[in-house]
Image (cartoon, rainbow, N blue to C red):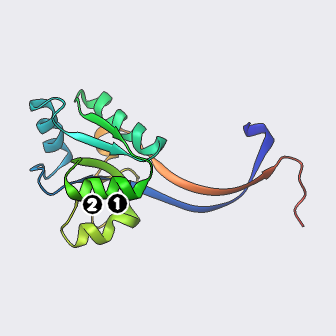
Amino acid sequence: MTKDLAPIALLTAGAYGVTLHPSVPAKSIKELIALARARPDSLNYGSTANGTYLGGALLCDMTGVKMTHVAYKGAGPAMVALMSGEIEVALTSVASTLPHIRSGKLRVLAVTSAKRFPSAPEQFGEFIRSEIEKWGKVVKATGMKLE
């Protein structure tokens, strides 16, 4: 399929944050990993799309922790679940989560990009050696002329 499409423009790009419900005592990724190792399958992580699922699965796989995956049909239901404590961990859009982080309703431990965010004290990539970003592009059919 990639041969059938040609990029026109990158519209958006952003990072995910490893975001916690405030009831989780971990204050860093290292502490979250230690907590998950001490209590296998006791933490639930939510996902809303392939990127957030793969990010959580990658965290579990590369650190040897076991958390229970809970899939949601969109960011809205996942955010409600995270804020209510139904799930304890989620990879969330940094931009859309920032108001909840600043209000203290949620806590972000790290971001999944190479660039540091002021609201995230650690870089997710420092622990799993990976970057996960979300993006939106405009593409066209190969051979299609733009006017």
Which mark lies nearer to you, 2 or 1? 2
Task: Return the x and y of residue 22 as percentages of the image width and height.
Answer: 15, 57
Question: Does residue 122 appear in this view?
Answer: no
Q: Amino acid at mark 1?
A: Arg
* Left or right for 51, reference 62: right
The secondary structure type at the circle numbered 2 is: loop
Determine which quarter of the picture holds residue 32: top left
Question: Is the N terminus in the top left, top right, bottom left or bottom right quadrant?
Answer: top right
Q: Badge 1: few (under 14), some or many (20 or more) residues near its Cα, within 10 Å?
A: some
* Left or right for 91, reference 33: right
Residue 26 in the image: above or below residue 127: below
Q: Amino acid at mark 2?
A: Ala
Q: In whole angstroms, how far apart are the C-alphas of marks 2 and 1?
A: 7 Å
Determine which quarter of the picture holds residue 41: top left
Q: Badge 2: few (under 14), some or many (20 or more) residues near its Cα, within 10 Å?
A: many
Question: Is the C terminus in the top left, top right, bottom left or bottom right quadrant?
Answer: bottom right
Task: Return the x and y of residue 123 as percentages of the image width and height.
Answer: 30, 51
Residue 49 in the image: above or below residue 139: above
* Residue at image location 35% in from the left, 52% down from the top: 78
Give residue 120's mark.
2
| Front position in the image: 74 or 102 | 74
Give residue 116's mark.
1
* Residue at image location 46% in from the left, 44% down from the top: 51
* Residue at image location 50% in from the left, 52% down from the top: 134
Question: Does residue 28 appear in this view?
Answer: yes
* Left or right for 146, reference 1: right
Determine which quarter of the picture holds residue 38: top left
Residue 102 in the image: above or below residue 54: below
